[in-house]
Amino acid sequence: MNPRYQITISWSDEADCYIARVPALPGCISHGDTYQSTVANIEDAIGGFIASTAAHGIIITESA
């Protein structure tokens, strides 16, 4: 399975970095100094989020 999720990325003046969120996965948030690093970080966060929920018996289904 290769799930695909909508990712929102915005710049935070307060944090001085990009912030990425996955609306379908509440609490799945990451950040980065560059847009590209933010994308890589949120992809890692999605994998960790799915692995963590699966380890607790929660199955996350694919979402668009």
Image (cartoon, rainbow, N blue to C red):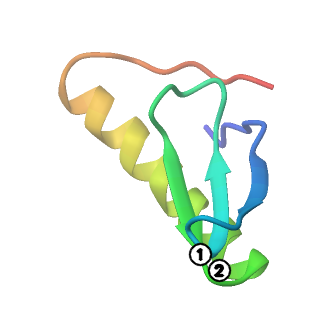
Residue shown at the point (40%, 18%) measured from the top left: 59
Residue drawn at 81 percent across, 26 percent down: 64
Numbered circle sitting on residue 32:
1
Instruction: Tell me whether circle 2 and circle 1 mark residues in contact (CB < 8 Å).
Output: yes
Point out residue 40 in the picture as x, y percentages from the top left corner.
62, 72
Numbered disc 1: secondary structure: strand
Quote the CA–CA distance across marks 2 and 1.
Answer: 5 Å
Q: Which residue was labeled with disc 2? A: 37
Q: Amino acid at mark 1?
A: Gly
Q: State whether residue 17 is above or below residue 20.
A: below
Seen from the viewer's position, the closer of residues 59 and 7 is 7
Image point (42%, 37%), residue name:
50
Q: Residue at x 77, y 76 (%)?
A: 35
Tag shown at residue 48: none
Q: Left or right: 21 with respect to 10?
A: left
Left or right relative to 24: residue 54: left
Is disc 1 surrounded by few (<14), some (14 to 19) or many (20+) residues within 10 Å?
some
Q: Is residue 10 left or right of residue 41?
A: right
Quadrant the N terminus occupies: top right
Picture quadrant where residue 22 is located: top right
Percent x, y of residue 48 = 37, 50
At mark 2, the secondary structure is: helix
